[in-house]
Amino acid sequence: MTTTSEPVSPAAAPQADVPQPAVTRPPSGTRVDVPALQQLLLGRWPEARSEARRLVAEHPELWKKEGITKEEHREITLAQMKQMVPYGHVLRAFPVRLGGRGEAGANLVGFEELVAADPSLQIKAGVQWGLFASAINHLGTEEQQDRLLPGAMDLSVPGAFAMTETGHGSDVASIGTTATYDPATEEFVLNTPFRGAWKQYLGNAAAHGVAATVFAQLITGGVDHGVHCFYVPIRDPRTMEFLPGVGGEDDDQKGGLNGIDNGKLHFTNVRVPRRDLLARYGQVAADGSYTSSIDSPGRRFFTMLGALVQGRVSLDGAAITAAKIGLAIATKYADQRRQFSPAAGADELTLLDYATHRRRLFPKIAEAYAMHFAHDELLDLFDVVFSGREDTPAKREDLETTAAALKATSTWYALDTLQECREACGGAGFLSENRFTSLRADLDIYATFEGDNHVLLQLAAKRLVGDYGKKLARAAKSPAGMAGIVAGQAKDTLLHKLPLTRLGQSVADGGAARSARRLLDADVQRALIAGRFEGMVADVAMGMRPAVKADSIKAQEIFDDHQVELLGSATAWAELVRWDAFTKAIKTVPDAGTRKVLTLLRDIDGLTTIERHLDWHLTNGRISAGRAKAVTATIDHLLKELRPHVLDVIDAWGFAPEHLRAPIADGSEKVRQDEARAYYRELRASGTAPISEKELRKQQASSPK
């Protein structure tokens, strides 16, 4: 198996004096201050991120071992978690009085970095401390925290997070498990009344878990008060046998993450003491009466689930980290790997010297930077909410919307990126030792857990379209207001075309360079990216407006007609959020050279985003056909301009060889290439090099007969 690049014409006969390709170097005065950029990328909690990276780098026993059985992998992962407990960084989010630090944002930063060690370790840690223990922490009262959290924190009580069911994956409100209150014994009777109500895909359920936080419909006095969470012991910790009434099955081998013992749980008349209803948002008195500080059942449900949004936030960061690891490996390899000679006697070109290879990797590097800065802002938002500094309904809604849109799009991006990196490294990329296949397999499930990506985009889009609908509703209260909306839409159609029409004309006028400069104007880029989002939201909102007054069946039909556009609007919003975050971050960089290269990356990301949706821009009259061609030509120019800086922007991510752990990225490829080049140079200089048959025939044809 060999790695190939763009086709190159066969070389002519060797010529020792053929000039070699010049080494590409950064232009004078335009260099990246790698240490300073690396410090910037550590974000708001540099100590936490650096500490987690040191933990991964300095403890090889935490690294994933390829080729082992799932049983071996499961036991190794559990042992790794126990090893991590004394370090304390996995406990940052918990109350100080219990040995934590009360640092919500810093906790997620450290958690995200564990993907570099082994995604199974990261996700099993997420199950234990980010889901099971977090449910106790955020849904329990202070008394319940004091009683139940210590065992979850120190891993003496491994636990499962039992929310998802076989029959209702992302539709948590419709789960079938019930918890019916019995006032005679002050207990809830927990049941999974049919097979589809079994809890499914639960980490720690198949082998290691001795307790679970179980989500069920709370029924008391004949009234269903909706989904609540209960703390339920599931196994005898001495024998590890299921307790009476509890049953389960092993999910067995999976497509990835086989260090996690995923399984199913079901319950038959399992009695749960009243005190083990996690009661922060809903309480049941001894007589069965129900009370809650949140009157609305719908808002109460979303508040309880919102307390667990950290899973989506952390998956966004972990997916970006995994994609960066893949890009770092593939880019370092492509900078050393040589394939095909441009002329006889010349050195073969490195893969990064081919336009196609730059197209495959560089836009994804730029997108990784955009995603990184957007994730930093998401972490800030998460921290202000979960620290309690700004825990308001509006902030929580912002957090849920942003986390949903970013997690959905970043996990898909990571999967696409790892596959592209694998293919870009040819046969070497398919070897397990170079990590692409393993990373991609482990991350595959990221697209569907903590919320299926399509459902999450729908959640985000409903908020975005709802906000636009409220604007319409306010305007509709007066004829003048509605007239203003209609006039504004007509004006928008004209004004959005105007600057881009001028850009298209500049191509026709022969001003290609001027045209490219216009595309590099930040205001033009944002107008296109934001314009697409705003246009899509407006179209969906107007199209779905009749559903407000329609009956439920007709309303569903209207929704179905617009669902694809609805999800597309959320993706468009995520792209705008990332472009804005990247642009904002650039303004904080003091070094001119670094700022110039980051702007180059931002432009690549912005124009690639526009190029990705050229069909929409063309059909909606936002861009001319000439401008569409200029977008692609400008990107290709920018990718060539990035070539001298690409290793710097990769190195600024701060990954040591211990984080990458891929032989093709450790410099050995350069040693092999240098050895081969030296061999052929010496062979040509010796005069003993064999002549090719083609050259021999050429000489024979030109000699006198």
Image (cartoon, rainbow, N blue to C red):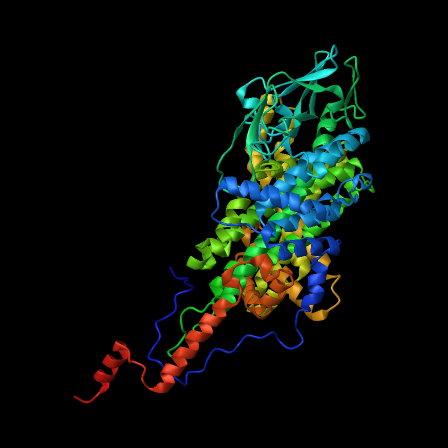
Instruction: Name the foreground residue: 413 vs 47.
Output: 47
Instruction: Name the foreground residue: 35 vs 695.
Output: 35
Q: Among all residues in the image, which is located at the extreme bottom?
A: 704
Question: Is residue 550 shown to the viewer in this render?
Answer: yes
Residue 529 sits above or below residue 270 on the image: below
Is residue 583 toward the left or the right of residue 568 in the image? right
Total count of labels: 0
Q: For the N terminus, give its image quadrant.
A: bottom left
Picture coordinates of residue 168, whole percent (x, y) = 57, 27
Q: Among all residues in the image, which is located at the extreme left?
A: 705
Q: For the C terminus, give its image quadrant.
A: bottom left
Question: Is residue 536 shown to the viewer in this render?
Answer: no
Picture coordinates of residue 692, whole percent (x, y) = 28, 78
Q: Among all residues in the image, which is located at the extreme front?
A: 238
Occupied quadrant, residue 460: top right
Q: Which residue is pictured at 52% across the width and 31% down the height?
A: 250
Picture coordinates of residue 354, whole percent (x, y) = 47, 67
Is residue 678 toward the left or the right of residue 150 in the image? left
Residue 565 sits above or below residue 340 on the image: above
Residue 298 sits above or below residue 472 on the image: above
Picture coordinates of residue 578, whole percent (x, y) = 66, 52
Occupied quadrant, residue 545: top right
Residue 634 sits above or below residue 224 on the image: below
Q: Which residue is pictured at 65% across the width and 48% down the height?
A: 112
